[in-house]
Image: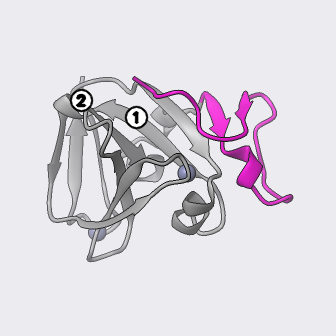
Amino acid sequence: MEITGGCLCGAVRYSSTAAPIVTRVCWCRLCQFIGAGSATVNVCFPSASFTVTGTLSDYSCTADSGNVMHRRFCPVCGTPMFSEAEARPHLIFVRAGTLDDPEIARPSTTIWTSQAPSWACMDPALPKIEAQPPPAG
Ligand SMILES: [Zn+2]
Ligand SMILES: [Zn+2]
């Protein structure tokens, strides 16, 4: 199998030969910046089977979870692409909107609900976790 995607302008492309491990909706405060006021939807893949072409910019900071995170985005069109935790280099989290087929990104959980604004739209069918969930793998 191959799952592919890329940024809005096409300068960055990626592919995964592995299926997603987990997909989550994240309402942490930082994701509200990246998600333009909404949550982000993040699809976790094993980084060993993941290939990226093109140049990315990297914004590194410490997340509420305490993890040092790298947020990678396309420097041409600004599309948020990936996040990676230094403590878990075997995983890469892909912003679901960049998938060629976003249908495959159906989330299983909503996380960091404690930081969501009162008007946030959340799927009532999904389990909610108030803060950081256990590691994906
Ligand atoms: Zn781009
Ligand atoms: Zn988040």
Q: Are marks 2 and 1 in contact (CB under 8 Å)?
A: no
Residue found at x 86% / y 58%: 118
The residue wearing badge 2 is 2
Q: Which mark is residue 44?
A: 1
53 relative position to 83: left or right: left
Query: How are the residues colored?
Result: one colour
Residue found at x 56% / y 58%: 31
Element on which disc 1 rests: strand
Q: Which amino acid does the dot numbered 1 rest on?
A: Cys
Residue 23, image x and y in percent?
A: 51, 33
Q: Is mark 2 within 8 Å of ligand 1?
A: no
Q: Which quarter of the picture shows residue 20?
A: top left
Q: Which amino acid does the dot numbered 2 rest on?
A: Glu
Dot 2 alpha-carbon crowd within 10 angstroms: few under 14, some 14 to 19, many 20 or more? few
Q: Residue furthest front?
A: 66
Which stretch appears magenta?
108-137
The quarter of the picture where the C terminus appears is top left
Taking 96 as reference, is 48 above or below it? Answer: above
User: Is-magenta flag for residue 130?
Assistant: yes
The mark nearer the N terminus, 2 or 1, is 2
**Mark whose residue sits in front, 2 or 1:** 1
Taking 67 as reference, is 76 above or below it? Answer: below
Mark 2–mark 1 distance (CA, rounded to whole Å)? 15 Å
